[in-house]
């Protein structure tokens, strides 16, 4: 199947205008293509979901270990879970806040 002189390899290919590309001299629009594999590829650099900071390398010799949070939500009878990476500082802060709220609820009964 041909579109505008370009052969598509599969139906999952997407063609979209590049928003930040400067216009060409002849007035033509700049386009880029991406397949689902490109769109759904995991990011090479994992960042903290809370602050966006870089995560330290896994190092067993220090106490600065990566944390991990979990989003849990429901839709009807279906329960969905998604893991979220956290930097050591955010993981500790979120844990401390959750523990404090737990204790407040226990005191209120």
Image: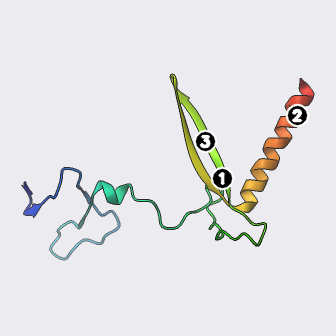
22 in relation to 107, above or below: below
Asked whether the beta carbons under mark 2 and mark 1 sit within 8 Å of each other, the answer is no
Real-space CA distance between mark 1 and mark 3, rounded to the nearest whole angstrom: 10 Å
Residue of label 2? 104
Asked whether the beta carbons under mark 1 and mark 3 sit within 8 Å of each other, the answer is no
Please state if 70 lies on the left or on the right of 30 as rendered: right
Q: Quadrant of residue 48?
A: bottom right
Mark 3 neighbour class, 10 Å CA radius: few under 14, some 14 to 19, many 20 or more: few
Real-space CA distance between mark 2 and mark 1, rounded to the nearest whole angstrom: 24 Å
Query: Tag 1 or tag 2, which sits nearer the N-term?
Result: 1
Residue of label 3? 71
User: Residue at point 7% right, 54% down?
Assistant: 1
Residue of label 1? 68
The answer to which of 75 and 81 lies nearer the viewer is 81
**Furthest-bottom residue in this view:** 25
Q: In which quarter of the image is residue 85?
A: bottom right
How far from the left and from the top, in percent, is residue 58? Answer: 66, 68
Please state if 58 lies on the left or on the right of 38 as rendered: right
How far from the left and from the top, in percent, is residue 99? Answer: 83, 42
Real-space CA distance between mark 3 and mark 2, rounded to the nearest whole angstrom: 22 Å
């Amino acid at each position: 199947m041909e579109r505008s002189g370009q052969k598509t390899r599969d139906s999952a290919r997407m063609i979209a205008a590049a928003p930040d590309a400067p216009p060409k001299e002849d007035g033509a629009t700049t386009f880029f293509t991406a397949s689902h594999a490109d769109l759904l590829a995991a990011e090479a650099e994992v960042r903290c979901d809370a602050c966006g900071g870089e995560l330290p390398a896994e190092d067993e010799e220090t106490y600065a270990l990566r944390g991990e949070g979990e989003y849990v939500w429901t839709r009807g009878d279906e329960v969905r879970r998604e893991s979220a990476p956290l930097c050591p500082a955010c993981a500790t802060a979120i844990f401390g806040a959750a523990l404090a709220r737990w204790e407040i609820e226990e005191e209120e009964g």
